[in-house]
Structures are given as C-alpha cells and as structure tokens.
Amino acid sequence: VEKVEHVLEYIEPNNLQALVHAIHFAVVFGENEKAKQRAERLGAQAAESIQDLSMILKGLSYWGDNKSVVERFDQETSLLLPESEECHQDLSQCFFYVGVAAARLKDEKSAWSHFERAQELFPNLPELAENMDDLSNPLKSEEGSWAFPLHEWVSLRFEERELEALAE
C-alpha cells in the first residue's frame, strides 16, 4: 500500500497500475471515498493500448462501477483489434470485465456475448467458466457475476480460518 501511495504521490500520479492497486486496497479496507476518487481519476485517463484499457476496466470493476465499465469499453472500439496474439489475453480480459458488468446490470444477452468473445480469445481466462456457468443456471445465484476471486478480497489467513471454522 505504501509503495502504491508513494508512486502516485511522488513519481507518477496517473500511473494506471498504481491507480488500480490503490482502488483495490481502498475498497478492501473500506475507504470508499478514497476508492471513488481514485476510480474517477482512473476513468479520466486515456487508454493508448488494449493493455491500458484492460487496466482501466479492472480498476473500475474493483470499484464496482459497472455502468462506467460498459460505457468505457464502448468508447474504445478502436483499441479492440489486437495487433498480435500477445494482446489476446488483455483483450479477453476486457471482454470478461464488460461481461461481468453487463450481467450485474441485468443485461444477460450482452453478458453472454462478451463472455463468449472472451472465451474465443483466451479460453483459460480465470473465473470465465464459472461466471458462464453461473449465468446459465436457471436458479441464478444472488451473488451474481464476479470479476475477481475471493482471495483478492480477503487474506489467505482469513480464508483458512473461515474454512476451518466451517469444517468444525
């Protein structure tokens, strides 16, 4: 956390990766106003590549601003043609974040379309298959779609304690 704050304050105030991490940490620590400010700052940044767009969508997804994820993706169509297969994972990640946002906005048709495109580009994308399974379940989970695994939200030590308590 300190390194991220140092980068943003003294080295590069608009560093996309540092902003994404700052949003993530602020959300996890319940610092919603700070997360909101960082998300707004991130959303105002220019995306010069598909990697930049992926980072921006990731940060907005951490903040939970589903509408902005979809809108930003729609604005950046010129970045959606990968120059090489090396871009496929980042492009797939973009389609995945938008699919999750669309599902959370109750637009299942769009969510499916984006998930399927993500799968075409990079079939082994973590969390993609589970989100597709959840979306196809007629008894949809109240949790809805999710862009990040549990371990990105809580510490592993906490997870281990909770699992041990459940096992007892």
Image: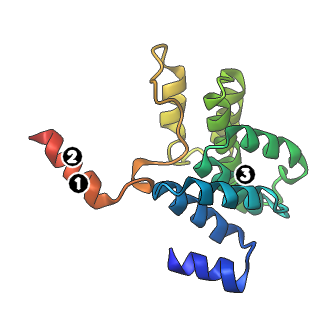
Tally the marks.
3
Q: Residues within 10 Å of mark 1 (few under 14, many from 20)?
A: few
Q: Residues within 10 Å of mark 2 (few under 14, many from 20)?
A: few
Image position of 1 with respect to 108: above or below: below
Amino acid type, callout 3: Leu
**Separation of residues labelled 3 and 2 (CA atoms):** 35 Å
Name the one closer to the observer, 49 or 129: 49
Image quadrant where one finds the C terminus: top left
Which residue sits at x=66%, y=33%?
116
Can residue 73 be seen here? The reply is: yes
Which residue appears farthest toward the left when viewing the image? 168
Measured as percent of width and height from the top left, residue 90 is found at 69, 56
Secondary structure category for the residue under label 3? helix
Secondary structure category for the residue under label 1? helix
Which sits earlier in the primary sequence, circle 3 or circle 2? 3
Q: Are marks 1 and 2 in contact (CB under 8 Å)?
A: yes
Q: In the image, which disc is placed on residue 163?
A: 2
Which sits earlier in the primary sequence, circle 1 or circle 3? 3
Amino acid type, callout 2: Leu
Q: In the image, which disc is placed on residue 160?
A: 1
Name the one closer to the observer, 46 or 137: 46
Q: Nearer the viewer, mark 3 or mark 2?
A: 2
